[in-house]
Amino acid sequence: MKVLVLKIAKVMFVVIILLLELTIDAFSQEKKHEIAVGALSMDQFVVRYKFGNENRMFRINSTSFRLSNSSNSDFETNDTELAFGLGLGIEYPKMVNDKLALLYGFSVSSYFANITDADNQQYSFGGGVILGSAYYFNDVLKLGVEIHPGIYYNNSKTAGTTTEKIGFGAENGWAEINLGFMF
């Protein structure tokens, strides 16, 4: 299983290098920037920064961030939770008309969560495709929808028991609606 994880990590590294190489000519045209806020579910959100040009946009995602402290006097526990995720990707928007664009691309992401005192820890990484569309209200504001099917590896440790999982397809957080602000 660890050999498979190393192979997946190597493939993700190569994908990141290819994504960076593909963005080199993105800086030779008129530059575009965007900040987007999206919802994956009622309690899971994403903040995304994009830069590039009208043909290619590089994406940096903060897929989640959580820092909390909770205590339970009945069980005499005091848990501190730290969770965060980061994603990188590239998208290719194709304008259908003046207001509507279809987009496709590729992304890689990672996630880490640690709960002290409860001895819970989880990390995952994966990659996949980006498929979506965007409606441009004007030069500053747009509404987008995306799906992110792909493959991922998840490792979780709870009370000393480790569980490893490799998944494919559309799991939790695979669909998103977002609001983008362009500048």
Image: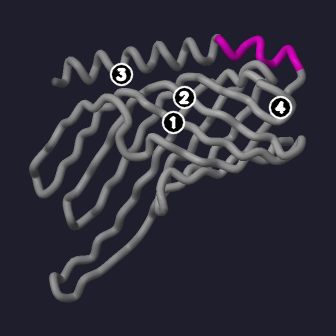
Q: Earlier in the sequence, mark 1 or mark 2?
A: 2
State the mark number for residue 147. Answer: 1
Residue range in magenta is: 22-29
- Characterize the magenta stretch by its predominant secondary structure: helix
State the mark number for residue 9. Answer: 3
* Residue marked by disc 2: 130
Give the spatial CA distance, label 2 vs label 4.
Answer: 19 Å
The image position of residue 45, as x and y in percent, is 54, 54
Foreground residue, 49 or 10? 49
Q: Residues within 10 Å of mark 2 (few under 14, many from 20)?
A: many
Q: Residues within 10 Å of mark 1 (few under 14, many from 20)?
A: some
Q: Is residue 23 magenta?
A: yes
Q: Is residue 168 left or right of residue 22?
A: left
Give the spatial CA distance, label 1 vs label 2.
Answer: 6 Å
* Residue marked by disc 4: 32
Amino acid beneath label 2: Ile
Quarter of the image that includes the C terminus: top right
Give the spatial CA distance, label 2 vs label 3.
Answer: 20 Å
Marker count (numbered): 4
Give the spatial CA distance, label 1 vs label 3.
Answer: 23 Å
Q: Is residue 56 left or right of residue 3?
A: right
Q: Is residue 106 left or right of residue 3?
A: right
Q: Dots 2 and 4: beta carbons under 8 Å?
A: no
In the picture shown, does residue 164 fall above or below 67? above
Secondary structure under the numbered disc 2 in the rendered image: strand
